[in-house]
Image (cartoon, rainbow, N blue to C red):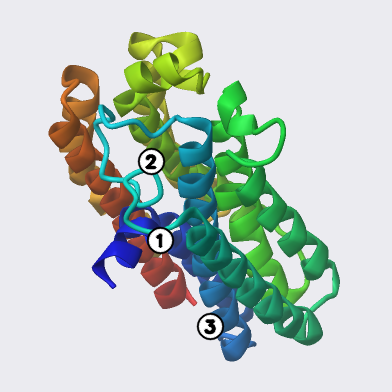
Amino acid sequence: MRIWLNAARPRTLPAAVAPVLVGTAAAVYVAGDLPRVWVFLAALAASVLIQIGTNLANDYSDARRGADTADRLGPVRVTSAGLITPKRVLTATWIAFALAILLGFYIAWQSDWIIIAVGVVSIAAGFLYTGGPRPYGYAGLGEVFVFLFFGLVAVNGSYFIQLEELAWLPLGLSVAVGFLSTAILVVNNVRDIDTDRRAGKNTLAVRIGRDRTRRLFLFLVLGAFFVLGLTIVLNDGPWLALIGLIAIPMARDPIATVTGRTDGPSLNKALAGTGALLGATSLLTAIGLVLGA
């Protein structure tokens, strides 16, 4: 179980939970209550399953392509280390995606069938990140897709399945959440920049270099809080949602580490810290939205 937990990469799971919380809380603020409780729980579970499936697919595909070598600075990858056979990892990947699809049918039945298309595209994006003939993660597009799916799609989708409409409030919040979700991947890629370069994995960090990647991380983290505050101001509240800004001090250590360190243990800690920053910011913002209702 400990090996499978490592394969699921729990430090990345806040990126799956955060957008669902924020998008749903925005719907609660607008509607005055939570219209579809079970749909919210199903969306939360589906989002986590898609993230786990993506992580497993990444573990499997990187091992096959030789990207996860013994000299990598990140945590051990179960496929490349021989802890779990590639076949079992791939099977677990499709089980996670299949369960997410089943939950997607329930969500679509309770809201709108367009959610099925959104779910299928999200799963395809998760698998093709490092899988398939031309993985976009190897072409420096990983950050773009994380921002799109774990920010814009997930937050606005969570809002839509509750009220079956879109609005400016969740759109602005989705940008803030997307920035912090993308920052998690940036930490991962700046940590692995040297091993990825040797393996021919041309992530954005490999393409633009360590210094520019560090500046990108700083922009994403600080930009997230700027957009969060701006969104609340432009929508005339709810002002209680500004309690999400309380999490700003949590950004200090990850920023200092990413901009000043290159060793694996420190950057692994910064990765966990960035995930915690996303989780805390999203949870506090969601609480403020619900209280504002």
Q: Mark on residue 184? A: 2
What amino acid type should be assigned to the residue bearing mark 3?
Leu
The residue tagged 1 is 241
Which-is-in-front pick, marks 1 and 3?
A: 3
| Rendering quarter of residue 274 | top left
Q: Residue at x 33, y 10 (%)?
A: 211
Q: Marks 2/3: CA distance?
A: 24 Å
Say above or below: 167 vs 176: below
Q: In the displayed structure, does residue 69 sit left or right of residue 121?
A: left
Q: Residue at x 40, y 76 (%)?
A: 291
Q: Say few, some or many: other residues with alpha carbon within 10 Å of mark 2 (under 14 / 14 to 19 / 20 or more).
A: many
Q: Marks 1/3: CA distance?
A: 22 Å
The residue tagged 3 is 41
Find out whether the residues at labels 1 and 3 contact each other: C-beta distance under 8 Å: no
Q: Say few, some or many: other residues with alpha carbon within 10 Å of mark 1 (under 14 / 14 to 19 / 20 or more).
A: many
Q: In the displayed structure, does residue 68 sit left or right of residue 103?
A: left
Residue 26 in view here: no
Helix, strand or loop status at disc 1: helix
